[in-house]
Image (cartoon, rainbow, N blue to C red):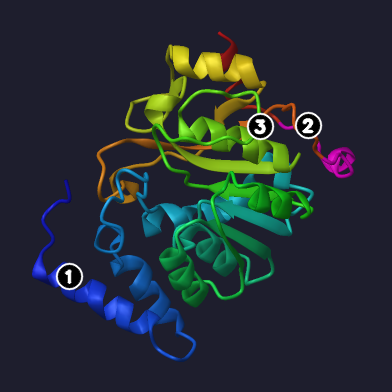
């Protein structure tokens, strides 16, 4: 059930949509206004069913410097970045701004209204409109030499089939396995804490936790999800759900046929959480 929307929130959302419909490029301040005030629940009535909880601006902005400092990016800076389940493209927008528009961005989103908005807000990205697990989208992505993948994927049960080893119903796991198959480089996701085997945000110190569903996913796929060194807090909480999220690395090999031409460029990384995760 959608939370009650105030008249002021509705007014600002309508102003943002008016900007989107302008027949000209938007200014920086106008784009920022749109990202801050567009409301997914006023565009997509069943947004929660589709897992459409859009990334808060503060959280998206924090990924820029974090992206640079990621171990796989220290010596080999990513150039081509795929943003899966991009929504309006806020992750790509913030990343592009931080990198002074020097990235080749591909945003994948199935909702055509979101894609229309995204093209206005992130016009320097190539937008791919289609279901992430459709053969057409998968084939298109596999033709790209992908250096890195970012995503705030939908959370919860959803029918997705990428042809991988994971056969469960959790969208975040299925998309994580698929993303890992697209590159041997950095894969950075925002994921719900309840789908992980650790807690880093909202607790006094890092905690390893038992999570049978995650353990089954990891054993089936060979994919592991590890914490970054970023903690989410009240300023980065999602607006329409109380869940706590973590910024995570998606690692490990998959059964998919992945090009390995860039593998020799990847240096071993120091895992600051290795002792915790193996305990």
Residue 36 in the image: state x and y as whole percent: 32, 67
Q: Quadrant of residue 252?
A: top right
> Which disc number belongs to residue 10?
1
Q: What residue is rendered at 37% in x and 53% in y? A: 54
Query: Is tag 1's residue or tag 3's residue first in the polypeptide sequence?
Result: 1
Q: Is residue 159 magenta?
A: no
Please name which of the two marks, 1 or 2, marks the residue nearer to the observer: 1
The residue where tag 2 is placed is 268
Q: Is residue 267 magenta?
A: yes
Residue 39 in the image: state x and y as whole percent: 28, 63
The residues bearing labels 3 and 2 have C-alpha atoms spaced at a distance of: 29 Å
Taking 53 as reference, is 230 left or right?
right
Q: What residue is rendered at 45% in x and 84% in y? A: 26
Residue 249 shows in the view: no
Image height check: is 265 above or below 94?
above
Q: Which residues are magenta?
A: 259-269
Taking 61 as reference, is 258 left or right?
right
* Direction front: furthest residue: 135
What secondary structure is marked by label 2? Answer: loop
> Which disc number belongs to residue 163?
3
The residues bearing labels 1 and 3 have C-alpha atoms spaced at a distance of: 41 Å
Image height check: is 29 above or below 197?
below
Q: What residue is rendered at 28% in x and 50% in y? A: 46
């Amino acid at each position: 059930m959608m939370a009650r929307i105030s008249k002021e929130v509705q007014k600002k959302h309508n102003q943002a949509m008016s900007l989107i419909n302008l027949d000209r490029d938007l200014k920086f301040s106008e784009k920022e206004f749109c990202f801050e005030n567009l409301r997914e629940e006023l565009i997509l009535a069943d947004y929660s069913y589709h897992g459409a909880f859009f990334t808060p601006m503060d959280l998206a902005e924090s990924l820029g410097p974090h992206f640079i400092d990621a171990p796989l990016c220290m010596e080999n800076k990513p150039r081509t970045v795929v943003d899966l389940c991009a929504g309006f493209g806020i992750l790509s927008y913030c990343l592009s701004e931080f990198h002074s528009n020097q990235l080749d961005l591909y945003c994948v989103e199935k909702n055509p209204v979101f894609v229309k908005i995204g093209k206005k807000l992130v016009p320097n990205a190539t937008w791919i409109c289609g279901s992430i697990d459709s053969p057409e989208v998968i084939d298109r992505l596999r033709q790209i030499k992908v250096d890195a993948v970012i995503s705030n994927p939908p959370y919860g049960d959803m029918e997705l089939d990428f042809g991988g080893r994971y056969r469960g119903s959790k969208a975040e796991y299925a998309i994580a396995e698929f993303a890992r198959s697209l590159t041997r480089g950095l894969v950075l996701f925002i994921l719900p804490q309840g789908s992980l085997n650790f807690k880093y945000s909202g607790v006094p110190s890092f905690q390893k936790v038992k999570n049978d569903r995650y353990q089954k996913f990891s054993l089936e796929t060979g994919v592991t999800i590890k914490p970054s060194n970023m903690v989410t807090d009240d300023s980065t909480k999602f607006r329409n759900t109380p869940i706590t999220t973590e910024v995570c690395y998606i690692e490990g090999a998959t059964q998919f046929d992945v090009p390995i031409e860039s593998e020799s460029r990847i240096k071993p990384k120091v895992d600051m959480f290795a002792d915790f995760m193996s305990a």
